Structure formats: structure tokens, C-alpha cells
Image (cartoon, grey):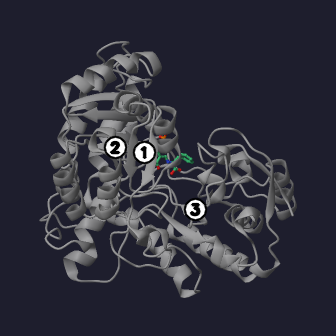
Amino acid sequence: MSNSTPQTMGQQFGRRSWAEPWKIKMVEPLTMVGRAERQKALVEAGYNTFLLRSEEVYIDLLTDSGTSAMSDRQWAGMMTGDEAYAGSRNYYNLEAAIRNHYGYRYIVPTHQGRGAEHLISQVAIRRGQYVPGNMYFTTTRLHQELAGGVFVDVIVDAAHDPADRSPFKGDVDLAKLERVVREQGAANIAYVSLAATVNMAGGQPVSMGNAKTLREFCGRHGIRLFLDATRLVENAFFIQEREPGYAGKSIAQIAREFCDCTDGAWMSAKKDSLVNIGGWLAVNDWTLFEEIRNLVVVYEGLHTYGGLAGRDMEAMAIGIEESMQDDHVRSRIGQVRYLGELLEDWDIPMVQPVGGHAIFLDARAFYPQLTQDQYPAQTLAAELYLDSGIRSMERGVVSAGRDAVTGGHHYPKLELTRLTIPRRVYTQAHMDVVAESVKAVYDGRAAARGLKMVYEPRYLRFFQARFEPL
Ligand code: P71
């Protein structure tokens, strides 16, 4: 949307009032269960919110992944699905939307983000190579490790401190990156893995300045720079808001400028792109693309569908267009901030500044009586569910998993419980309910005892691990 388009009534008339740029056409009833049933459900789920049935949940803030509401245009697009095995017209629409908005030359669809992570890791990492990145993400790091890579965190220190209010806590620390390159040699760096925004840091953005510096640095050393574009649209909003020189540019212009600093990207379209399933991998280099296109048929499907139905690709193509509209992004991040402001008024400890997709409660500050071996963030997620049926997600020591070499726990500095806001799904009144429940759990914090893990799966343990109260 161009900047000359009138956006909100507030912007037209200088009024304070503000509202979502959509109205609701179809509703889905919520289910609410009583406290005794919640207690029972929690025990049956092994105190793991991933193991609850969604019918036992009142307000579902587990994730913003695949949980957004599609628009009427997207649903109409679903009906135009061309379910051909090869060369579906919806694939070409998707390719055009990605080329237009993200700017990459060669594209394969994948069933979701981790399908794309698998492919890029297999084609771009040689066993023993290093992969520096701006903080780990669970599935991203696992695929890098399964391909024989060694992930190295090179994010700025501020990212590890929930109270630090720096505007771009997703930035790569160039001194850290330089050190890895110097010590290991450029030939032993598979690529730089840049996520925008940084999920595990609290949805924190990367500045355009940092992306341009990385472009220059990687170019100089002959290292490729790949982007995790999963929440790039939200990153673009923060650049527009916070970085000098970008206030007059649209989200779409900023997103494109950011991608132009990189050699390719993987995407979980289940976030920014407003679909319930889908992803893609895109690169500019033809030789690399040939390898990707060859591998995609082994793991996902033919290179013109990559595990998706034609209708899914159409919904994604339309979702990409909608996701880039300034009004939409402002409304989406505005809702997250609204919840953040309610909690801040009550001095609830959380990651600051509030990021793009979620509130990240600081479970260490909630429960100073618990060590990380007693799983404070997992405990907080369980307490929130018990209080009000709100489902959140642990993002602490359970998510961090074990060291691939020593087998010991990773102990991340950040021990967080994430309240993730789906796009276009809940109203401001739901946010009020959430805030009051968080406040009630905070008021009862002294009674928390923590949990012990009684079952631990080998990969991505947080999904299926089971716990019991201490
Ligand atoms: C989120 C998810 C979904 C998820 C994944 C793992 C554990 C728990 C929940 C997925 C992402 C992501 C980024 C930055 C790649 C993926 C994988 N996030 N990069 O936050 O946030 O995409 O789920 O489509 O495979 O709840 P995928």
C-alpha cells in the first residue's frame, strides 16, 4: 500500500482512536473448561502444553504458526486450486509473488519451514563446517547439525538480556562473526544464517544497517548469507519505525531491500504469509538451485508443488500480498503491544522491548526460587493453563535441548514463556483476559515448586517431553 493511501481514521484526522483494518465474517466458538478439568487435562498432558487437546484450551497462544485467519480473498483463492501434479498455475502465481516481494530468482515450495531448512542444510553445509547465526532456532539448528554443521551464536549480547531495551536486539555482532571466520577460516564457514526477526530472543528485529554490513562482510570473505524470512514482514515494521531514513518507505519496499542483501532465504509461510500450511526455499544461484530442485523431489514432492496442494499455494500467493500491507502489519504488531502495555502497567517481568509476534514472560524473574533444572518456563506455562485455560509455550532450557557433542543440557540465559498472538484471530477483549490471568499467576508466584522431566524424546524434546510436579 502506498503511503499516500489514507490508513486509519486517526491518521486522517489526527484522532487517537484506532481499529483493525478488517471486520469479521465467520466466527468459531471457543470452548471453556472448568478448573477441575484443566487440572486433569494438565496431568494427562504431562504438564506439557504441546500435549493438550485444543478443545481443552480457551485462548490458544501456543504459537502464531499456521494459526492465523485467512481472508475472504484467500478462501476464494482456495477454490481456484489447480490440482495438477506438475506445473499447477497456482505454483506460477506463488513464484511471481515471491519474486515480486522477496526478489529471489529460483524458488521451490516446501510443506513448511523445516522442509526448506532441511534442503538448504543438506545442499549448503559440508560435514564439520561452521554455521554462525543470530541466535539458534530449534528446527533450524537441528537441521544444520543433522547435516554435520556446527552452529555458533553470533548475536549481540543485548539479545540475551530481557531487560535491555536496545532497538535492534536481533543484530549480528560483527566482532563475534569476525572471530569465528578468523579462527575457522572462511572456507570452513558454510554460510551465515540470519533470522529476521529473531524468534528465541523475543521477536527482536535486525536493522537494515546490520544487513548491509553483513552483505559487505560476507561478500569480502566469499561467504554466503542466507535469510530465515519467516517473520521478515514484522522485522520491516521495526525498521520503518526505528531506523533513520525508513519512515517514508513502505513495508514492502523495506522487506525487498532487506532480501536484496542476502543470497537466498527459507520461509515458514505459516507465520507472516497468513496461511495454515506452507513454506518455500529460494536462492539466486543457479547451481545451488539445481541441487535444491533435485533434492526437493526426494523429500517434499515435485519442484512445482513441494508437498502442497495447488489451493495451498494459491492461498500463500495471496497471503504474501496481504502480509506486506502497512495497515495489516501495524494492526498485528499493535495488538501484541497492547497486551505488552497492560502487563507493563502491572510490572510483569518480560522481554523488552516487546517484539513482533509474542510477549515473552521472563520466567526466571517470576520464579527466583527455581533453578533452571526445575524448568521455570515450563512451570509458568502450566500455571497459566491451570489459571485460565490459556495455552502458552516454553522457550527456555527444555527448548534449548542438549549439546550435540557433550550430551549435557544447554542452559540458555533466556528462560521464557511465550504468549504468541495468531494474526487476525483474537480481539482486544481476549488480550484483556490474558493480561488478567498473567497477573493472577504472577501474584501467586511464591507458591510455585517447579517440575521434573520424566520422559525425554531424542529430537526437539520440548514437543513431547513429560513432566511431574516436584
Ligand atoms: C513457532 C514455530 C513453530 C515451532 C517450531 C518448533 C518448535 C515449536 C514451534 C517455526 C519456525 C520459526 C523460524 C524463525 C523456522 C521455523 C520452522 N516456528 N524459522 O514459533 O519460528 O518452520 O514450523 O513451518 O517448520 O511456534 P515450520
Q: On the image, numbered disc 1 is attached to which residue? A: 70
Q: Residue at x 53, y 47 (%)?
A: 138
CB-based contact (under 8 Å), mark 2 and mark 1: yes
Ligand 1 closer than 8 Å to label 1 CB: no
Q: Which comes sooner in the sequence, label 2 or label 1?
A: 1
Q: What x and y, as percent, mark residue 56?
A: 74, 52
- In front of the other: 107 or 36: 107
Q: What x and y, as percent, mark residue 254?
A: 19, 57
Q: In the figure, residue 330 lies in which quadrant?
A: bottom left
Q: Residue at x 32, y 42 (%)?
A: 191
* Residue type, mark 3 in image: Pro
Quadrant containing the N terminus in the rendered view: bottom left
Which of the numbered marks, if any, corresponds to residue 271? none
Q: What x and y, as percent, mark residue 36?
A: 87, 61
Q: In front of the other: label 2 or label 1? A: 2
Query: In the displayed structure, would residue 386 be above or below residue 110?
Result: below
Q: On the image, numbered disc 3 is attached to which residue? A: 412
Q: In the figure, residue 81 lies in which quadrant?
A: top left
Which type of secondary structure does the marked residue at label 3 adopt?
loop
Q: Residues within 10 Å of mark 1 (few under 14, many from 20)?
A: many
Which of the numbered marks, if any, corresponds to residue 319? 2
Q: Residue furthest front?
A: 183
Q: Is residue 431 left or right of residue 380?
A: left
Q: Which comes sooner in the sequence, label 3 or label 1?
A: 1
Residue 392 appearing in the image: no
Residue 207 appearing in the image: yes
Q: Residues within 10 Å of mark 3 (few under 14, many from 20)?
A: some
